[in-house]
Image (tube, rainbow, N blue to C red):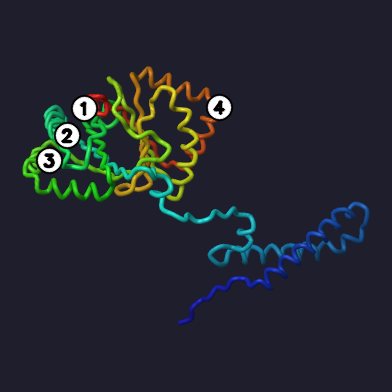
Amino acid sequence: MLEQVSCSPCDTCISKLLKDVFILLLLLLSWYLISKTSLLCRRFEPFLKKQLSFILFLCRRFSERGDKGWLRSLFVHKVDARKDAHSNLLSKKETSNLYKIQFHNVKPECLEAYNSLQVEVQTRLHLDQDYPCEVVGSWNTWYGDQDQAVHLWRYRGGYPALTECLNKLRNNKEYLEFRKERAKMLISRRNQLLLEFSFWNEPLPRPGPNIYELRTYKLKPGTMIEWGNHWARAIKYRQENNEAVGGFFSQIGDLYVVHHLWAYKSLQSREETRNSAWLKEGWDSSVYYTGTGNTHTHSVTIKCSPVQQQH
């Protein structure tokens, strides 16, 4: 059995080909300049066309071979590879907070009972100093996926704090009973582990009542750094009304996912705040550039949250 072997052009071949292209371009230029004043160039026309076809054929063949064609590499912008992980380049260096976001799809007839049970257990864990976790916010979806509960937890201390908390909960009989009772009320559930962007505010309790908007973006792989660079500039246009609650990107779970959490006094306040951003020079370009790396956007409006000053 014979194996076809494709070879890449050597430096000598490339140099010779570039030289031939340069000479051919000079000949073509000369031919164009004198074509209307001399009949002699007509004798060279077939020769020049033949040379041009041959050179173009070689260029095409060389550009198609190898992992990256040498001809293409002359014109394509090269981006240096990342020297570090997203988590180190985009997250806050002064903190080691890890976040977990939970999405619980609740049986419609069980939503009220679910909320009561969830708040009771969450409050105990939030106030218990023995557990290195705290409830940042807990919401029910208002517009978007109906009968859905969204919970955001913070683990101060990162992955070790998460591991410590999980180990303790496995031995907490009261919590295990809660999980069994909660399971009867759920249709499905999913979660993600998140880090917070360095340029966003840390989520803090705020006066209520408020409605919250969770905007979720699914990015193209490889565009997370670019997204962060653009939003580091864009976030300054969304600070006047203190609407920016937090910005996060996924680490475990669905990858290349970004969550932006906003707070407004009302739906009318949301509309006015968003419209005012478009009047500021620079906001439009920031939105445009982040949109080019985004493959999916999802927005839900949620309410009823302990992120307000209730604890």
Q: Is residue 153 left or right of residue 109?
A: right
Residue 73 is situated, as x and y percent measured from the top left of the image, at 61, 59
Q: Is residue 4 left or right of residue 142?
A: right
What's under tag 4, amino acid-wise? Answer: Glu
As measured in the structure, the alpha-carbon distance from the residue carrying label 1 to the one carrying label 3 is 26 Å
Indicate the position of residue 196 as horizontal and vertical percent values. 36, 41
Cα–Cα span, label 4 and label 2: 45 Å
- In the displayed structure, does residue 135 sit left or right of residue 260? left
Marks 2 and 3, the one that precedes in the sequence: 2
Q: Please tell me the numbered disc located at residue 183.
A: 3
Between 303 and 241, the one lying in front of the other is 241
Determine whether label 2 and label 1 are within 8 Å by CB: yes
Foreground mark, 4 or 1, reads 1
Q: Give the structural element (helix, strand or loop) at label 2.
A: helix
* First-in-chain label (4 vs 1): 4
- Give the spatial CA distance, label 2 vs label 1: 9 Å
297 is higher (above) or lower (below) than 263: below
Residue occupied by mark 1: 311
Q: Quadrant of residue 203?
A: top left
Would you name the residue on which mark 4 appears?
281
The numbered mark at residue 127 is 2
The nearer-to-camera label among 4 and 2 is 2
Are circles 4 and 3 on residues that touch, CB within 8 Å?
Answer: no
Quarter of the picture holding the N terminus = bottom left
| Within-10-Å neighbours for mark 1: few <14, some 14–19, many 20+ | few
Write the residue at 19% across / 41% down: 188
Which residue is at 53% across, 25% downward?
Answer: 280
Q: Find residue 274 and report its image quarter.
A: top left
Query: Who comes first in sequence, dot 4 or dot 3?
Result: 3
Quadrant for the C terminus, please. Answer: top left
